[in-house]
Image (cartoon, rainbow, N blue to C red):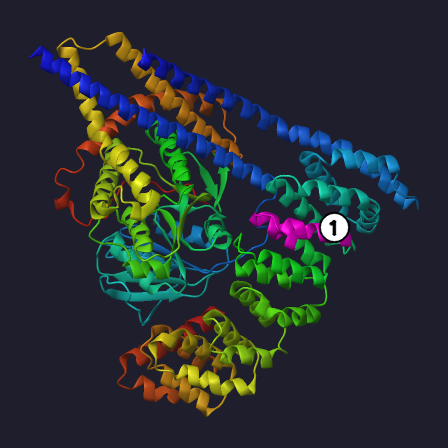
Amino acid sequence: MGIEKMIYIYGAICFSMIVFNVVYNVLLKRREPRLTRRCEEIEKKVESQLKAIRAGGTVAPEHLIDLQRRLRRINNLIAFDRVLKPIFEGNYEEIGKGYLRQIQPVILSLAVRYQKRDNMQAAYFSYFLSRYTAKRQMPMDSVQDILLEYVKKDNLYCRVNALQALYAFGNIEHIVTALRIQDDGKVFLHEKILTEGLLSFTGNHDELIRRLWKNLDTFSEHTQLAILNYIRFQTGVYAKEMFAVMQDETRGKELRLSAIRYFGRYFYEPALEPLLAFVLEKDPSYWEYATVSASALARYSGERVIDALKEALHSSNWYVRYSAALSLDAHQVNYTDLIDVVAGNDRYAREMITYRLETRELQKASV
Amino acid sequence: MMDAFKLFFIYVGIFFILYMIGYASFLFLSVTVGSSTLYQIKRRNWLKNELLQDYYVPVSILVPAHNEEVTIETSIRSLLALKYTLYEIIIVDDGSDDNTAKILQEAFHMQQVSRPIQRKISCQPEEAIFETYQFKVPITLICKKKGGKADALNMGINVARYPYFICMDADSVLQFDSLEKIVRPVIEEGNIVAVGGSIRPCNGTEIQNGRVISYSLPDKILPCMQVLEYDRSFLAARILFDQFNGGIIISGAFGLFKKSVVIDAGGYDSSMMGEDMELVVKLHAFCREHDIPYRIRYASDAICWTQAPEKWSDLFKQRRRWHIGLFQSMMRHRKMLMNPKYGMVGMISYLYFLIYELFSPYIEVFGLITIVLAFAVDLINVPFMILFFAIYVVYSAILSLTAFFARIHTIDLKLTMRDVFKAFGLCILEVGGMRWILAWIRATALIGYKKKGRTWGKIERKQIKFK
């Protein structure tokens, strides 16, 4: 009897699976036509409001009420996004901006509503904001305050989309606060995401960097690294500060390496001595400093630099030798200048520089 | 004597009931979790819950090749068509007897260089190295002494410039966005040491510039059944194991690895036939033994198209090879079995693979012999047995179809009615026929496997319809 019951149970599972397959298939097939219908309905309403704006009028209060009611549903918000997209991609951006400005109260109320929704819907709403209101430089302080709440959610996409919207709004105060919120360690945000995001900031970068630098030590090392990388890609005027980071032995390795990379991007005379010291460091545990410094020295000229790089070719570490060879190549050092290495006893140094010279020829041939 | 038989059959019956409950429950769980995860991903993408900007992690693609003159040029051209910018291609020709190296040199205008190789993992020595910079990304060809696929991959790791590498088969084709998708978990989560890609049989599929132009089930029955089997057994199960960081298989046809961790763990074991599975189990063991926080993920949307064998003999070869690889990996890491030190990997994944993958062919063949024996001594309820078998077939077939349709729906592929009917019919045939044939093949796989040694598992391939 027990066995039979079990068979019935598995039979029921089979049956429910069939039902699931059929229902899902039907729902999926209907989704796109339903969305198209929704788009058509919303488009008609938006179009009539745009006409009114073109004629110098304003958005009708009934439209605001209607939008507020409709856009509570995520599928209507998706349809609304599809309706707005061609407006902003076409020649109607200015009118579109005017329209968005007038429906701000609706967006604000939706921001509050979607904040309470599940993370996926909240993430979609912040994506919507980053596309329309934020990118269009619409000053909506209240929305930005609410976006900070979105950054607090334990969901990567919600955080990333909300941060993206905040970068687009361009308010420094909110960015600093948002970075501090995301630094709570609940959700991993790769430093590339943070750096790329900061680089997309639409406000005053100099002021943002000044504020971030002032508060640098209040962030986790992970966020500090993203900020240092952002500064490296954005400006060359932080050499003095970066120099301090590079020389500070209490700082984390990645931060110091990022600072060394800064001097590979921007020439800074006082950095030369420490870079040479890193390259000539014999302690194998410092190989990463030596490797990055050897790369950075491509930007510095002089006999001492060439000598140090040639010396680095004899390093026991492959990566140091490789970086040194690349930098020597960047200095346009020719075969005769390297004859002591090429004809020398160190096979590893010889092989590396020979390979680099061969590669240079291959790369030249491919241009 | 009869009493002894009866007692024997009672115990066998109890064992099989427990075994089947375990199997049915696992199958149900994996298909349910697998399908719902696919639907969840679909919803996530629908609601723009994805990283919308391009974040590039530098990746070295390793292509081990042995006598691949028929497909190698097409494969490398497909890699050059990938929607990604920061990568390099490294082909390791493992002592080919044919013109693999020559074809590559001519097709990609490669020049010999004296590149120094940092030998962090031991492998057979290189004989010549060629490079070219005339294409979108640098291409390197290493010609080396034959040492097997694992040895070729170790050479590739030694040569790789970037912190992550991808291993793939020379006769497979990556979908245009597969690199971006397989790298995504590295950006989205910390501590990623490996990501498995999704392997799909491409028989019947037309691919242009890495994009699927037309999709239909293969015309031939054998690869068609494998399509259904892949979705039920591989796709669904891997998604389930991924939920608790318990995946212990990343196909050698497409996987991403963190180079530094693989090097620290000792690289691929060239004495193994299933080097891909062994590496993943080894990474689990290594990270746990050294208290390294880690995550091994499965990216169901990072797609690699590969040819499913179209001949029974090729399929048998492939499955024998897989089974031997499974056996070797499980034996090598037997300390993980039910060992709490290895967490869910030891308590669930290892146990599952031991019972339902490694032992299952023996159990299933034993079951069939028992049925025959019981029939001979008239101790079997034939109508009940037929009912039970029918339920089993219908149950498995429905779960196969659920996994299959979940995949089809969630990647917006359109099937013809002919394909739908074909799927219905062949899933019954797969569960009721092919599964048993393969059980026998796997059960006999270990006979004389040591003599086969480190060989390249070759099956007959056609040119993939890649334009």
The residue sitting at the left extreme is: B1
The residue sitting at the right extreme is: A56
Above/below status of B150 relative to A4? below
* x and y, in percent, of residue B157 in the image: 33, 60
Q: Residue at x 45, y 17 (%)?
A: A15
Residue B254 part of the magenta segment: no
Image position of B95 (left or right of B390)? left
* x and y, in percent, of residue B464 in the image: 39, 42
Circle 1 SS class: helix
Q: Report whether residue B217 is seen.
A: no
Circle 1 crowding by C-alpha within 10 Å: few under 14, some 14–19, many from 20: many
Q: Amino acid at mark 1?
A: Val
Quick one: B248 or B464, which is closer to the camera? Answer: B248
Residue A143 part of the magenta segment: yes
Where are the magenta residues, as a range?
A141-163
Image position of A242 (left or right of B401)? right
Residue where numbered disc 1 is placed: A143
Above/below status of B258 relative to B417? below
Q: Quadrant of residue B402?
A: top left
* x and y, in percent, of residue A206 in the image: 69, 71
Image quadrant holding the N terminus of chain A, namely top left
* x and y, in percent, of residue B396 in the image: 36, 23
Q: Quadrant of residue B392?
A: top left
Q: Report whether residue A86 is seen.
A: yes
Q: Residue at x 34, y 73 (%)?
A: A318
Q: Main secondary structure of the magenta part?
A: helix
Quick one: B432 or A111, which is closer to the camera? Answer: A111
